[in-house]
Image: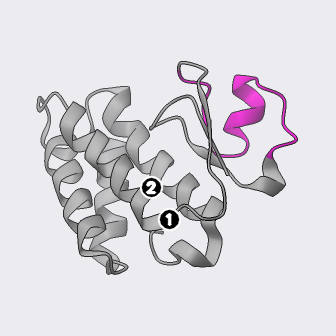
Amino acid sequence: MVQVGGPLGGFLAADDLDVPLSERALAARGAAMGHAGLVAFDRDVEPLRVLRHVWEFADAESCGACSPCRVGSRRGLEHAAAGTPPGPEYGRMLRLMAGASLCAFGRRVPDAVRSLARAYGDRLAGWEGR
């Protein structure tokens, strides 16, 4: 798996790596160019560890100006730290963050989480928050 554009840029599974590094092509796969960094993960990396990292980053870097991002990042981290797939409220939280956060940071967190869940497939089933 490859993380594109930093913690909120998104993740691509091994089968999705044949993609041009352009905003349009990455967006079609649920990722974003971000700062154009690439981090590769091998199969031995525990999916929940990566998910927890994304939520830790979101919680630490949220400026706190809006409740959807501030509270959502904290709750996302709590769910990830618990290690068990969350219930339906998790999906509502992701939709609220994506739609009501004041800046692109808060709106991008749910996309990154969903792309990670897609990239890991069954190993993160339930975390996409549909």
- Name which residue lies at 78% across and 33% down: 25
Three-letter code, disc 1 = Pro
Mark 2, other Cα within 10 Å: few <14 / some 14–19 / many ≥20: some
Q: Mark 1 points at which residue?
A: 47
- Name which residue lies at 81% across and 44% down: 17
Mark 1, other Cα within 10 Å: few <14 / some 14–19 / many ≥20: some
Three-letter code, disc 2 = Val
Instruction: Please state the horizontal and vertical placement of residue 76, each as a whole percent of the image.
Output: 26, 59
Residue 18, relative to residue 92: is it above or below?
above
Answer with left or right where residue 102 lies relative to residue 48: left
Which residue is outermost to the top? 35
Instruction: Please state the horizontal and vertical placement of residue 38, each as a whole percent of the image.
Output: 63, 31
- Asked if the stretch drawn in magenta spans residue 73, the answer is no
Helix, strand or loop at label 1? It is helix
- Asked if the stretch drawn in magenta spans residue 33, the answer is yes
- Name which residue lies at 16% across and 27% down: 63
Stretch in magenta: 17-34
Residue 110, relative to residue 123: is it above or below?
above
Q: Which numbered tag is attached to residue 121?
A: none
Q: Are marks 1 and 2 in contact (CB under 8 Å)?
A: yes
- Name which residue lies at 23% across and 49% down: 73
Instruction: Please state the horizontal and vertical placement of residue 108, each as a whole percent of the image.
Output: 43, 38
Q: Mark 2 points at which residue?
A: 50
Distance from disc 1 to disc 2, alpha carbons, whole Å, reads 5 Å
Answer with left or right where residue 74 lies relative to residue 43: left
